[in-house]
Image (cartoon, rainbow, N blue to C red):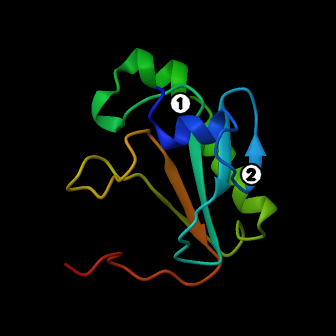
Amino acid sequence: MTDCVFCKIIAGEIPSTKVYEDDCFLAFRDLSPVASTHVLIVPKEHIESVAVLTPEKEAEGLRGIFCVAKAVAEADGIREDGFRLVVNTGQHGGQTVPHFHLHVIGGKELGWPPFAN
């Protein structure tokens, strides 16, 4: 998708601080981190959101994303203490970029509930 900021990051048109990359996924540091570790994992295939997933699309485009999240957590030294995985979906869910992405957040104790509204 030509106007998607994450597709442009994947293509190397917009710089990012990469922390992981393979054939299917790119992980990079969030520009507005909420903790010392705040990494976004995006599939290289453009998938708009969880709302458009089908069993086939999920299997082909997102298989392995949790293993990538674990690798990111291990690389940042937060796996043992714990971390949070967040997927925002749609406007009311807080999704600001229409490309599926998983937030890996950690490096401090995270409260619950995550948002006070």
* Labels 1 and 2: the sequence-earlier one: 2
Q: Which of marks 1 and 2 is in front?
A: 2
Q: Where is residue 90 in the image (x, y as percent from the top left)?
A: 26, 47
Q: Position of residue 72 (x, y in %)?
A: 72, 55
Label of residue 18 in the image: 2
On-image quarter of the C terminus: bottom left
Q: Residue at coordinates 44% horizontally, 34% vertically from top-left?
A: 3
Residue 65 drawn above or below residue 103:
above
For residue 92, what is the image quadrant? Answer: bottom left
Residue 26 is situated, as x and y percent measured from the top left of the image, at 67, 41
The residue carrying mark 1 is 62
Indicate left or right for 10 with 4 as reference. right
Q: Look at label 2 and name its amino acid.
A: Lys
Q: What residue is rendered at 42% in x and 83% in y? A: 111
Question: Residue, x 52% and y 57% (percent of image)?
Answer: 103
User: Mark 2 packing: few (<14 Cα in 10 Å), some, or many (20+)?
Assistant: some
Q: Which residue is drawn at 62% across and 34% down?
A: 64
Determine crowd level at label 1: few under 14, some 14-19, many 20+ residues with C-alpha closer than 10 A: some
How many numbered marks does the figure carry?
2
Q: Is 78 in front, or is 41?
A: 41
Question: What amino acid is labelled 1 in the image?
Answer: Leu
How far apart are the two marked residues, 1 and 2, measured between alpha carbons?
19 Å
Say what secondary structure mark 2 lies in.
Answer: strand
Q: Is residue 91 above or below residue 7?
A: below
Decide: marks 1, 2 in contact (CB < 8 A)? no
